[in-house]
Amino acid sequence: SLSLSLFRSALASEKCDTVIQALGPNCNPKLPEALRRHPPPDQLLLNTYEEVLETFAALASLKGVGEAVPGYQLPEDEEERKRREREETMIYSPPPPLKGMQPDWKNALIRYVRGASKKKKASIYWQDDEFMAVYDAFPKAKIHLLLLPCQRIVDSPSCLTGAKEDLDLVDRMYSRATWLTERLLEANGGRLEGVGKIKLGFHAVPSLRQLHLHIISDDFDSPCLKNKKHWNSFTTDFFVAPEDMLIALRENGGFHPNRHEMSRLLVRPLRCHRCHAELSFMPRLKIHITKCKKKKNITE
């Protein structure tokens, strides 16, 4: 009939080729063939709809029964969609390093927290509602990310206290960075050759505002690694492991670095982080660490 043709045409335009119609039980005693016996009408209605949904699920290949509807995909749970999208973006692909300091560079991380521009979003490696990991604009190794909280503005580690809120924040940053490191290595497989171990740490006296945890590989293979300050900020006690930060907060009620001592650490002689050999200048140190096989803790 014409009405059926129009109905089929409308279905085709919506890319729909299967319709299941369920008619509820007749519970009106004034109508013929009204339902008067067991099961109760509400239970029968429930059973009917369950059967309809199971049939539809079978058609959509959810239970492997029946023939799948070509090209059909069920709407994805929002949390599951976010999780899948995060995992799909675990490929480590940093943008080119910046060519120079940008205006108001000290607040660069705060601008991420307050809402990254479209240009800045290319520098975000991963994020969820609580944290984001951004590519370091001047990476000092093959892998160099900064993990920062999104919910709070905390200028630096020195602003942290022994309060439960701060302890929980650092502990969650530590856990998330550990998880992120595992996922990063898992997702990138053989793409990241020669990266060595990945280390986590805070700078005792950071140059950028907003608390951030460095996720960095100890190959230190980068053209942005240029001087003693760069090197020593990752290979001396200036680089504070998250577990040491937690101890300081619990035992001392805060993190209180001796700024004079920290400044001295940044200008100490260059030493290999593996064998502790002293080298006279950066080019020679870089050549040395590509050949040095002796493994040492990065903060020793």
Image (cartoon, grey):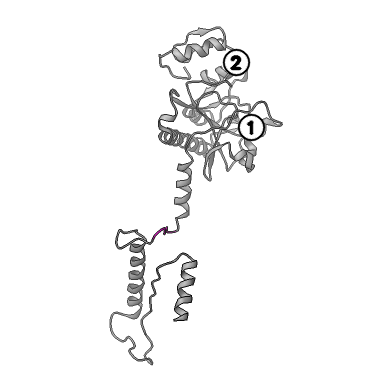
Mark sitting on residue 46 = none
Q: Is residue 294 left or right of residue 160?
A: left
Judge the density around disc 2: few (<14), some (14-19), many (≥20) Cα neighbours within 10 Å: some
Residue 64 pos. (x, y %): 30, 58
Q: Is residue 212 above or below residue 226?
A: below
Q: Is residue 76 above or below residue 6?
A: above
Quarter occupied by residue 135: top right
Q: Which residue lies most toward the right here?
A: 103
Q: Quadrant of the N terminus?
A: bottom left
Judge the density around disc 1: few (<14), some (14-19), many (≥20) Cα neighbours within 10 Å: some
Magenta residues, as a range? 70-74
Mark sitting on residue 227 = 2
Mark sitting on residue 209 = 1
Q: Is residue 36 left or right of residue 232?
A: left
Which mark lies nearer to you, 2 or 1?
2
Q: Earlier in the sequence, mark 2 or mark 1?
A: 1
Residue 56 pos. (x, y %): 36, 66
Q: Residue at x 44, y 66 (%)?
A: 16
Residue 290 pos. (x, y %): 46, 15
Q: Is residue 232 above or below residue 47?
A: above
